[in-house]
Image: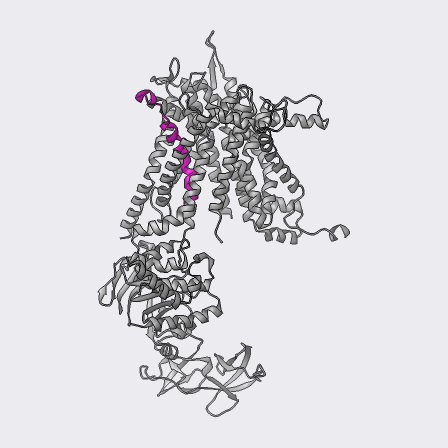
Amino acid sequence: MIEISKVSKVFGSGDAAVAALKDVDATIQENEFFTLLGPSGCGKTTLLRLIAGFDHPTGGTIRLAGDDITYLPPNKRPVNTVFQNYALFPHMTVAGNIAFGLEMLGQSKTQIAETVDKMLDLVQMQALRNRYTTEISGGQQQRVALARALAPQPKVLLLDEPLSALDLKLRKEMQIELKRLQSETGITFVFVTHDQEEALTMSDRIAVMRDGHILQVGSPRDIYNHPVDRFVADFIGETNFLTARVAGKKVKLTSGDVIAAGDVSRHGEGAEVTVAVRPEQVRIGEAGAKGGIAATVNQTVYFGTDTHIHLKLGDGSDLVARLQSPPSGESGLSQGAAVSVQFTDGAVQVLES
Amino acid sequence: MAEFGRRKFSATALPGFSTVAAITFIVLYAPIVTLVIYSFNASDSVALWGGFSAKWYGIAWQNTHVQEATIRSIIIAVSASAIATTVATMAALGTTRRGKYSGQTLIYIMINQPLMVPEIVTAVALLIFFASIKVATGYTGLIYLIVAHSAFCVPFAYLPIRARLEGMDLTLETAAADLYSTPFRTFRRVTLPLLAPGIAAGAMLAFVISLDDVVITEFVKSAGQDTLPTYMLGQLRRAVTPEVNAIATALLCLTVLLLTLFFLLTRKRG
Amino acid sequence: MSTSLEKQRARDGWLLSAPALVLLVFAAAGPLLIVATYAFLTPGDYSGVVWDFTLKAWFQVLFERDIFDDSISMADAHLSIFWRSIRLSLLTTILTFLFGLPTAWFIATRPAKQRAAWLFLITIPFWTNLLIRTFAIMEVIRYDGLLNKALLGIGLIETPLRIMYTDTAVLIGMTYVYLPLMVLPMFAAIDRLDIRLIEASYDLYATRLKVLTKIILPIVRPGIIAGSILVFVPSIGAYVTPRVLGGGKKMMVGNFIELQFGAGRNWPLGAALSLILLLIVSVALIFYVRVSTRSDSDG
């Protein structure tokens, strides 16, 4: 559907030049919910604006359904955007906003009325159709922005952090709503966010970006369970990092304990590697348990549903375990208690770099 | 401790400030109110109250000098504010939202120049300049006044339009382009409607400024081209009758009306 | 590519601004150059100029030549007009400040809902015709005006005061007409003042006087400077108010300039005086830009 090849973007010139995108390659499939995820300044919004046509790349090409659209102006691309601040026209009504794109495409009055009607139903805004967009709530504005961008039936819908202005509860609702709209309309969604949880819940595939590069592309499960590097592992969810050396098909931690880890074949015997393990994959047992790593409890932090146990291993390295809070709310692990730690099978990942 | 205990602490209270403020408001309004009251004076004097009457409004209304000056004032103010607002709108579009470019400061200074030069200096400059054109061409119509008024109205029209443009969300135009709108249609359907309150406000300020002008008009006008303010200035040399109060009151009402409209237009939404 | 975009931006900017610039060059800035030229020419017999270059107009600003014995002496009348203009303008600035600061403070400390209404009350006189306001204050201070009636009524004076056609009348008039120009920028500055700063200084044992001098005045300073310039500049160039309230006798520079173009029939002298007035205003504006940019970098 969308092929991005060798796309780079430099802002400014001379000494003040800043490279926002560096030779980015990506392919977005038809009917896919594709998410660009990364911290602010990673280039995700820049990439979105290049796909929308609001800006032109310094190098590289962007193809849509086989056609080169790199330098096509935004009003000539079958691509619509839901803006971060919605960018609803304050001097038009809800219906007027939704009709705008259709009018610009030169559709007939009856055709426009029909589509607007359908869109209002789709986002459940029929009752407020004649209100001005300044007179409706943030969540409602969000729906209008969606309807307005979907009305011309674009090949691709671009969403620039559209949920960031909403409160937590509304955000959760809209996440489900967006997913529903995507499957109902069958339109390709390209979604930009810095919220890893949002990315994990909604996407078919995620591209994790940093400093103008795409670090990893994959399904949410892929990315969460097999992060390519420390940055991805750290950015998506919480992770423990431990230093180890390759020992046969296992790894030997600096604490001296030997544990099973993912594929170590790429690293030579004795090579230093970083292994990652998610806190929820850490099991805590009684001290001295067979196959366990000796640790002491440093601190317990109560989070409601979860309790985080901060542990110290024999060599002084830190490890966090996440346990479901028991009904009493007391984990029974007091500071200084000696325990043993085990990892769930397949939980320990060896990072590529 | 008693003297601290009872009085409510207020961080913003300063002794005597409210009293001076009250005096200021009274001093500001007492003369204006007096002027309005005496416009309804039945006697011929502006000093002695002879009972309530609206007769001076009738007399002013019947006065052909006043009639002609009024029409002239309105023609000039309408033309000047239309011209000033048009060029100011274009200039505002040319000086905002497009990043820095060379000469921008110069344009900005040029546009605001009438605010910096004393009116009397501009007035004599125009007197000299237009006098030579009048001699050369023999034409002495209202155009000179309209051009002069248009020029000094430009900064007043420019400021609210520029403010409105700077406050305008640029993504709205991006959104229009995203929704298949051509640049021209974006300007007509999005930019212009959103700019309209600023343009209206600018036009209103320009109208009021033109209507109020005394100094430049006094120097630029040819014989028999009195506007309402210059007519009033001429009358002040003679024995003043409440007729002047009546004209002043009418002008005052018009100004207040336009200002109220201006405030309603520029008031932030929501 | 970025440089060509910049060029296009500059070209579009200039093109869009062009109509305004043409109008302003033709009917505002351009004619000032003619004034500058006329200041170096010889006066014509009845009015206008003769195209003979001379510095006589500038000489006349400061000196006069006796028509009988050709002796040269300082032009006291001219100097006193300049001195009166500067003195009255400074006094006007001070008076408007003394009335304006408490007023601006009062408005800025009203509850948010009332504030717009109080501000509107200041704005109405601001936009009301200067001539009408001068006329209104004239009605109050004249011999048989409201002020004398009130003072006689409460027995403070026994004979009415003769205020009209004195420097005092001009001073009262200018203070009255230019007061809103002082209040508005000071209000804007006070409005930005964070009330918590005052609370913090009271919390740190400051007295009211210390709060005023150490906190409020320094923070409001840009507004005070802007207000002072906004009052001083039109005061020094005032024409209508001194003409109406000072009569023909108590002239300010503006009236004196007009005289040269009217009965005085000395256009070059009028042009030279205009340039001097322009110079005084420029100095005031440059001083303002200097001071205000400095206080920006302070904060």
Residue plotted at (25% across, 63% down)? A60
Residue B37, position as x, y percentages in the image: 60, 31
Residue C234 is left or right of residue C3, and the answer is right
Q: From this viewpoint, which residue is outermost toward the bottom?
A: A290
In the rendered structure, does residue C91 fall within the stretch colored magenta? no
Considering only vertical position in the picture, is C72 above or below B92?
Answer: above
State left or right for residue B115 relative to residue C251.
left
Q: Let me know if residue A197 appears in the view.
A: yes
Give the prevailing secondary structure in the magenta stretch: helix
Quadrant assignment, res B130? top left
Q: Nearer the viewer, residue B158 or B104?
A: B158
Give the side of residue A290 with respect to residue B148, left or right. Answer: right
Q: How is the image coloured?
A: one colour
Q: Is residue B179 visible?
A: no
Viewer-nearest residue: B269 or A70: B269
User: Which residue, as the protein is rendered here, is positioned at the far top?
Assistant: C68
> Which segment did they paint magenta?
B134-161
Q: Which quadrant of the structure image shows residue C146?
A: top right
**B209 vs B125: above or below:** below
